[in-house]
Image: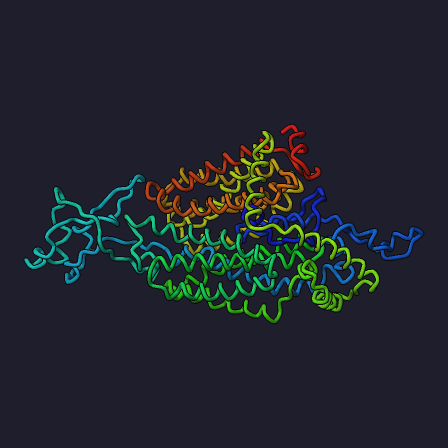
Amino acid sequence: MKDSDENINACGGSLTPNMTDDNVDVVATGEAGEVDAKEEMDAKETTFTMKPEDRSSGENGDANNPAKRVGSASEAFEHILFQVGSYGKWQWKIFFIVSFCGIFTAFHNLSAAFIAATPEHWCHVAALDTLDGSHDLRNGSVPWKVGWEGKGEFSSCTYYNRNWTGLVAGGLTGDDLPFLPTSDVPIQGCHDWVYDHAIYETTAVEEWDLVCLNKYRMSFIQSTYMGGVLAGALVLSELADKFGRRTISLVSAVGFLVASVSVAFVTPYPLFLIFRFFVAAFGSGIFLSNFVIIMETVGSEGRTVMGMMYQCFFAVGFMLLPAIAYFVNDWRSLQLWISIPSVLMLLYYWFLPESPRWLMLQGRYEDALKILRQVAKTNGGSLPPKEELDVLCDSVEEERLQGVKTVEGVLQKVCNFFRSIIILLSTPNLRRRCLIIFFAWFVVSMVYYGLTFSGGNINASPYLLVFLSGLVEIPSYILSCWTLKKFGRRLNLCALFIICGISCLLILLVPKEMVWVNLSLATVGKFFNSSAFGVAYIYSAELVPTGVRNTAMGTSSMCARIGSGLAPFIVDLLGDLHYAVPSTVFGLLSVVAGLLALLLPETGNTHLPETVADVEALAR
């Protein structure tokens, strides 16, 4: 699953609807692939609405003059789209063609929970391999330690440094091991490990021994993946503006398939990370490009439903992944099982049209009209009369040529970005708003992934935890839609964060052995976290002025990527201190984010701020 700061203006171009409406109805939630923030606002904000009476003759000659009715290229396209059918069978056909990409990309977003799972492990003492007996070979060879919660277990990273070769040569048997003295015996760190295969046949952790002193390397598996999501959104969405949404979607689909299959065959660990980085980058390119095609070809009346349903396919992927992983226990085989189905996305070449809005912005009017004729035929609409169409196209062409004259180079874009950042932080009220929403995005994304990967810390089955994480997302989207209208933005975001935080903090009070209680608390936390994600998308865009809104949303998205990249380190490394440390960190950060939300103004039923002065004029 962004905007400006990452240059993720995936909707790009002047044909996107203007942002003036005051009420937000769409909630595109979840890390599903952070959908373009500007498009989310477009989903509920478009200035142009063609009424039936506009098509009829009137006393005022200007009433039927499209040149008078249409004030921008965006409005011109909205007018044409309304005439051919802005929300009908054609849009739903395209929706279902592109939405399945959410399932395939979701597979890889959380696949690390299974391909990089850490099995139970202990030191391998090679001299004991030949022993027989009824006792566990760990008795007498591996130290017994008692954790903070008072539960004893064999050490995973040390063993007793005896002359094992000499003992075995002297007749030591497996039955003798439990009776060997352990006091005053030196302890040595492991150099090799034995892994329990009761749950997983093989994992990447076992293959590269990403345990004990190397455990930090395991955390890079997911953090580099999230870096790929950021890079893909940054680069590929920019290329989608230049070369087309369909083109980038197709290129990304090929890259996604090649990279994901390659992950299953690489042997060096660095290459494993690199290919997963590209899987994430190309997955982001597919998800964003397809989302933009949907949003650019459907009218405002359908963007709310389609925007939310698009995210639901991502949740379906979350639920299907553990079902596949349960039956495929070898990590390389699992990687192939979740990669090969993405070959279906290559069918986009035959079934996915280019965005007619983008085609018109490029001056390719005949190509755009060819697609719009198909829309009209399927939806039962019709293109405007030729005279009216010429005027509308002239309006688009004038704005397009003006845009060509003002195309920014890379250096200019970088300068404009930093200029926008300075504006965001230059005045007290705007600075406070931005810092709070940046922190909120950082926290909500960290907790989103942290809770999903924390199954090992609370003894919960990763299969069940990932499944429940996907299951709760769909109702959480619905909750966000309802609470936004019922309670507004500020109190809504505050309550969702605090409830999520309390659920996480309660894990500290529950013994680790009470797995179902801890699993329930983690699931409740994930539910309200997902809802908070949806509210944060909408609320953030309403808090900043128009001129720097894209930069604010892009910077927020970057903060989210930083948070999600840090999540595995918190889960893996702090979880070694105590099983509840990660959930406590997530809970405290969520509560702080919720309380800080009270310092923000309510933006429901208000006009979007156009200037910094508008922001500073408000009390908060």
Q: Is residue 177 left or right of residue 96?
A: left
Q: Is residue 524 visible?
A: no
Q: Where is 376 relative to 30, above or below?
A: below
The residue positioned 30% from the left and 54% from the top of the image is: 120
**What is the quadrant of the C terminus in the image?**
top right
Residue 279 lies left or right of residue 132; in this view the side is right
- Quadrant in which residue 129 is drawn: bottom left
- Reply above or below: 62 against 419: below
The way the protein has been coloured in the rendering is rainbow
Question: Which residue is at 69% across, 64% downward?
Answer: 364
Is any atom of residue 183 visible in this view?
A: yes
Residue 379 on image: x %, y %: 74, 65
Q: Residue furthest front?
A: 405
Residue found at the very far bottom of the displayed protein = 350
Residue sitting nearer the eye, 47 or 32: 47
- Identify whether 457 is placed above or below 502: below
x then y, percent, for residue 502? 48, 37
Residue at 64%, 64% (x, y): give it. 354
Q: Position of residue 136 (x, y in %)?
A: 20, 55
Q: Nearer the viewer, residue 404 or 612?
A: 404
Q: Position of residue 406 (x, y in %)?
A: 65, 50
**Most distant residue in the top direction:** 619
Outermost right residue = 59
Apparent side of residue 253 relative to residue 183 in the rendered image (left or right): right
| Count of number-bearing discs | 0
| Residue 337 to residue 41: above or below | below
Could you say which quadrant of the image residue 53 lies in? bottom right
Which residue is nearer to you in this view: 522 or 552? 552
